[in-house]
Amino acid sequence: MLEDAWDDAPVGTLTLRGQLRANERAAGLVVSGGSLSSISKNSSSHSYAFGSGNITATEVANTWRELIDLYDLVLASLSATDDEEVYAEMMRRLQPCFEFTKDFSAMGL
């Protein structure tokens, strides 16, 4: 999800957070009785497959919020002035995920 936001973020100074927030808002607006399968924004679409489980739009929005919180934490700790530094540090801090889980408490934020 972070890589999708990075790809979609406009070029400029500290715009990654704005894209993360836009993705969070978009996920929060999705009303669905089943699982979320895709998000479309700015002429691009991103599909997510979660196996046999279901994930709600609220859970996706909460995941975007976790990334926004991580962005703010990294920005404050690095005193960074551009998104490339922040993105690289965010990717370094995120732990690889090899299966879907609803428990993100071990992300080490």
Image (cartoon, rainbow, N blue to C red):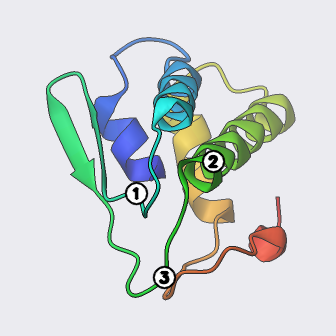
Q: Give the percent coordinates (x, y) of residue 108.
A: 82, 67
Which numbered disc flags the more N-terminal residue, 1 or 3? 1
Dot placed on the residue nearer the N-terminal end, 2 or 3: 3
State which quadrant residue 86 falls in: top right
**Label 2: few (<14), some (14–19) or many (≥20) C-alpha neighbours in 10 Å:** some
Write down the residue under mark 2.
58
Q: Secondary structure at mark 1?
A: loop
Q: CA distance from mark 2 to mark 1?
A: 10 Å
Which amino acid type is marked by label 2?
Answer: Thr
Give the alpha-carbon distance from disc 1 to disc 3, as whole Å. Answer: 11 Å
Q: Which residue is mark 3?
A: 53
Marks 2 & 3, CB-CB < 8 Å contact: no
Residue at x 49%, y 38% (from the top left corner): 27
Q: Amino acid at mark 1?
A: Leu
Alpha-carbon neighbours of circle 3 within 10 Å: few (<14), some, or many (≥20)? few
The residue located at (47%, 39%) in the rendering is 31
Q: Is residue 104 left or right of residue 46?
A: right
Q: Residue furthest left?
A: 43
Q: Position of residue 72 (x, y in %)?
A: 77, 32
Name the amino acid type tagged 3.
Answer: Gly
The disc placed on residue 36 is 1
Q: Disc 2 vs disc 1: Cβ atoms closer than 8 Å? A: no
Answer with the quarter of the image where residue 51 lies: bottom left
Q: Farthest top residue?
A: 12
Vertical position of residue 109 compared to residue 50: above or below: above
